[in-house]
Amino acid sequence: MRIIIAILCCVNIIFAIDMITPIPNHIEYDKAKMNLGKSIYMDTSLSKDGKVSCNSCHRIDKYGVDGLEFSIGVDNQLDKPFNTPTSFNSVFNFVQFWNGRAKDLKEQANFPFFNPKEMGLTPELLLQKINANKSYVEQFKKIYGKIDLDSIADAVAEFEKTLITPNSPFDRYLLGDENAISQQAKKGYEAFKSNGCISCHQGQNIGGNMFQKIGIFETYPNQENLGRYEITKKEADKMVFKVPSLRNVAKTAPYFHDGSIPTLDACVQFMAYYQLGKFLNQETVDNIVAFLESLTGEYYGK
């Protein structure tokens, strides 16, 4: 079985080489919807205790995360069992959430409002709070002609579309600037490819475009949540999760779906162990980390 997996990984590598593409400097969006969605994203009053907003866990000043193992929701509850994924560049993901339970940003946007550990509202209470805000009422009337759950989610998703971070050193390197990244980062990129990391982490978001099992060669120790299995109930989906984007990964610790790994170098070594069945020497780890650090882009703000 391991041999078959290894062969498949090698086949994937062949097709994945140089399949990382730069993030665009701009993405089309509706400005009025975006501004409304940003207000909602930042609004702590749209939670049960009036203390939690989307930005509380997906902080704009921290590359779309809060830096915690588990985020803190309403009534100081820990939002277990998942580490909060970044909202930055999430528009490029093929599905949303670690287990892929939302097909796009709009579908994703409704979940936190009604999660009892996150914002703790009911649909009725969310609509009541929105309707109590004169500015929201005026904007929704002008943009959508109505206020309902669909239009609220649409506005939030429109803002989240703008949370992109182009112009990373590695993007500039891909576009032809040979001096944009260090020699160590270049070695790291080659090691990233030759060791098979790119078989899962590729595409525009360097991840976020497929599901993969964590623990291919060694059993992953934390089985508290079984990933896609919780959604599909298919045996083959146990411990299968959406592959995370590696963009800005140097800024979004701790790592893995359970937030169990605090540092980037440890994350690289652990992934090699669980996914590739190998240990990497420290020089290779350091080189890959240098490459990963070159993936930090620029958020221009809207």
Image (spheres, rainbow, N blue to C red):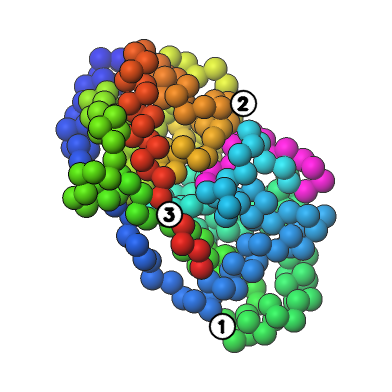
Q: Name the residue under label 2.
A: 224
Report the residue at 33% width, 46% height from top: 169
Q: Does the magenta stretch include residue 172?
A: no
Amino acid marked by disc 3? Glu
Residues 76 and 241: in front is: 76
**In the structure shown, which secondary structural element does the residue marked by tag 3 occupy?**
loop
Q: Mark 3 points at which residue?
A: 298
Label annotation for residue 296:
none
Please report contact status of discs 3 and 1: CB closer than 8 Å, yes or no: no
Range drawn in magenta: 74-86
Report the residue at 33% width, 18% height from top: 283
Q: Is residue 240 left or right of residue 79?
A: left
Report the residue at 37% width, 23% height from top: 286
Expressed as whole percent of the image width and height from the top left, the position of residue 226 reads 54, 29
Q: Of the two numbered discs 2 and 3 on the same chain, state the one appearing first in sequence.
A: 2
Expressed as whole percent of the image width and height from the top left, the position of residue 36 reads 60, 73
Amino acid marked by disc 1? Ile
Label annotation for residue 143:
1
User: Label 2, label 3: how many angstroms apart (C-alpha)?
Assistant: 35 Å
Residue 94 against residue 278 in the figure, above or below: below
Q: Quadrant of residue 298?
A: bottom left
Q: Does the magenta stretch include residue 84?
A: yes
Please report contact status of discs 2 and 1: CB closer than 8 Å, yes or no: no
Q: In which quarter of the image is residue 154?
A: bottom right
Between label 2 and label 1, give the one nearer the viewer: 1
**In the structure shown, which secondary structural element does the residue marked by tag 1 occupy?**
helix
Residues 50 and 221: in front is: 50
Amino acid marked by disc 2? Glu
Q: In which quarter of the image is residue 10?
A: top left
